[in-house]
Every structure is written in C-alpha cells, then in structure tokens.
Image: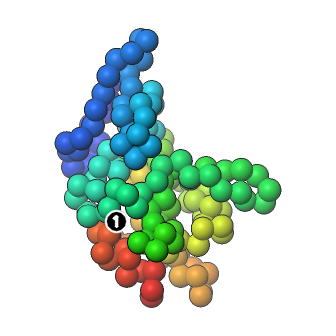
Amino acid sequence: MPFPRLNLPPVAEISLRHTDGAVQVFDSLRRKWLVVTPEEWVRQHFVGYLTGSLGYPPELIANEISLRLNGTLRRCDTVVFSRSLRPLAIIEYKAPHVAVTQKVFDQIARYNIVLEAPCLIVSNGMRHYCCRFDKAKGTYAFLREVPPYDILVGLESE
C-alpha cells in the first residue's frame, strides 16, 4: 500500500514493520502492532500531531473507545480526556480519499450524545474540521483550527 503524504506536520515516532506480507504500524497508545489501513495511517499521524505539535498528553488520549448508544455498541476512533478523565474531544478519522461529509459529523454527534465532549474533530488527513459543542444551547460552532491542549481544557469550563 502506498502511504499518502498527509496535510499534517511530519511525525517523528511512526514505527512500521513488514510481517506476513502486511505492513504494520505500532500504536503507542494501545501498545500493539496493527495492520496499516488508510484510516489507521491518518489516525497515527493525527495523534502524532496532537502530542507533538499541540501539547496533548499521550496518557490522556485513547484509541478505539467503546460506548453504548441506544443499546448498540459503537466505537469512537479517538477520545481525548481531561486530567479528571472527562471527555474533552472525540475524533473521527476517514481515509484520505474519503470526503468528510455531513454523514461523518452526524456519526460523531451521535457519539457525543453519550460522551458530551465540548469538542468534535474530524480528519481525513488532508482536511481537518473542529467544532465546539455548546451543551447548554445544543449548538455546534466550527473553530478555525484544532486547539492546543491547554485551550481545549478551557473549553470544558465555558
């Protein structure tokens, strides 16, 4: 599989290996090797961007978080937590060739019914969207960029 160049800063800590005819990437958050899919390629680079460029503590980021929504088990691609372990952001990834559509935002908004995170982020590695959820008003407002962790923490209390 060719690995596309993404619209993210270079990540220093991407470990790849070839095994059983497949390319695998080491997910440092889950501490295991995974087959590289286009979506996983985006996830690993985006998490590297969060931790390397925006100051997100790796110990407060979790990949593949399960939740129950309307009796059905769902899985968030990534959740960022506060130091008190409240969800601050839900992140949904798509492959670089997949357009980010309203359907993707509807998916992440449904997850937020359960988690009530103040920030929702969607990325296909080429385009990144971030919106602020105002629980009191039940509205979403797009932000110009993904906020650094210290700003994200402030969104929780607004």
Q: Which residue is mark 1?
A: 146
Q: How is the image coloured?
A: rainbow
Residue type, mark 1 in image: Val
Dot 1: few (<14), some (14–19), or many (≥20) neighbours within 10 Å? some
Q: Position of residue 103 (x, y in %)?
A: 60, 54
Position above or below: 59 against 8: below
* Label 1: element kind: loop
* Numbered label tally: 1
Q: Position of residue 12 (x, y in %)?
A: 19, 42
Q: Nearer the viewer, residue 28 or 12?
A: 28
Q: Position of residue 106 (x, y in %)?
A: 62, 60
Quarter where residue 6 is shown: top left
Position above or below: 112 against 40: below
The single residue placed furthest to the right in the displayed view is 71
Position above or below: 7 against 142: above
Residue at image location 27% in from the left, 37% down from the top? 14
26 displayed left or right of 91: left
Name the quarter where the N terminus is drawn: top left
101 displayed left or right of 9: right
Inspect this view and state whether residue 40 appears. yes
Q: Nearer the viewer, residue 9 or 59?
A: 59
Residue at image location 26% in from the left, 64% down from the top? 55
Residue at image location 39% in from the left, 26% down from the top? 24
Inspect this view and state whether residue 95 appears. no
Q: Position of residue 40 (x, y in %)?
A: 43, 38
